Amino acid sequence: MRRVGGKSRQSASRVILFLGAPGSGKGTQSSWLSGQLGIPSLSTGDMLRAESKRNTAAGLKLRKILASGSLVDDEMVCQAVSSRLRLELPARGIILDGFPRTLRQAECLDRILSDLGIAGPVVVHLDLPNGDVSRERLISRMTARRQCGVCGSIYNLMSRPSSLGMLCEKDGGVLLQREDDQEAVIRRRFTEFDLSCAPLVEYYKRADYHRVDGDRDTEVVAAEVLAIAGPAETSAAA
Ligand code: AMP
């Protein structure tokens, strides 16, 4: 995706979080926005997948949960995310992809922000129609998704193939299918999302909450996201 304005923009510490169904484009939008704003992004899915590769009892347990499409328990996720947030938030803020996913996690995030004296998050909800037709379309898109085993860049066999076939254009890493991008697991992930989304929207809707129609071209969605999450114009000189 193109850079807007030709250079990264940096802003004071703040939190931007993406809500959305599996396949709604949270990963793509958050990494692009991260490049635009100069704020790091954190994907709890990537973090947990990395943890699950450890050859420990905890790693094995995690691997089973991820492969089933269920959510990892709140305590474990909050613990893992807390230390990272407390370290990174004060400097430049963070873009969150996939956290919080439950009310307990939202409360955990609020506690951390309040401890650090940082304002509540800008919530960007990438909303998709949830009828059967669009879900089937999403499932086709997700089963065609491939990720570089080295840098994590995302490709799609149908809509965004690599010019190097099954290798990453950035570093030549092999492109792999995520274990949880198998059809049966995707369906379970949708069920989890449908259960958890409404309470989170309810929780955030009186705050800085923005519903964005995610069922459009990536660039169009990105422009709207940037308009919402881009740094506020500084009227007073620092
Ligand atoms: P994602 O990459 O965001 O689609 O997440 C992949 C998987 O990681 C999910 O299906 C869950 O099993 C797990 N996961 C990611 N983020 C969370 C979270 N905040 N809470 C619980 N489980 C999570």
Image: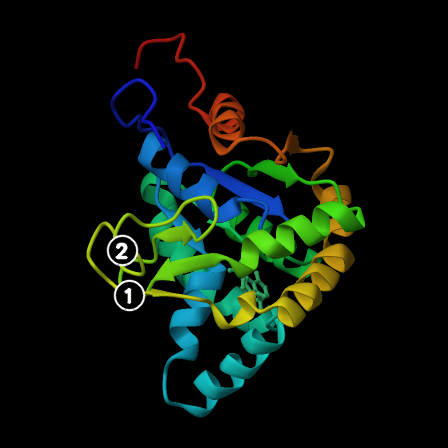
Ligand 1 is within 8 Å of the C-beta of the residue at disc 1: no
In the rendered image, the vertical position of residue 210 relative to residue 83, given as above or below? above
Q: Quadrant of residue 189?
A: bottom right
Q: Are marks 1 and 2 in contact (CB under 8 Å)?
A: yes
- Percent across and percent down for residue 165 are 30, 56
- Percent across and percent down for residue 57 are 46, 92
As helix, strand or loop, the secondary structure at mark 2 comes to: loop
Ligand 1 shown in quarter: bottom right
Locate the C terminus and report the quarter of the image it occupies.
top left
**Badge 1, how many Cα within 10 Å: few under 14, some, many 20+?**
some
Task: Report the residue that reaches farthest toward the bottom.
Answer: 57
**Left or right: 149 as drawn, with respect to 24:** left
In the rendered image, the vertical position of residue 158 relative to residue 44, given as above or below? above
Residue on which disc 1 sits = 174
Residue on which disc 2 sits = 168
- Percent across and percent down for residue 206 are 73, 33
- Name the residue at 59% across, 57% down: 108
**Left or right: 14 as drawn, with respect to 100:** left
Residue type at the position of mark 2: Cys
- Name the residue at 47% across, 57% down: 145
Q: What distance separates the C-alpha of mark 1 from that of mark 2? A: 6 Å
Residue type at the position of mark 1: Val
Q: If you read the primary sequence from the N terminus, does the residue marked by circle 1 or circle 2 appear first?
A: 2
- Name the residue at 70% across, 53% down: 136
- Percent across and percent down for residue 67 are 56, 77
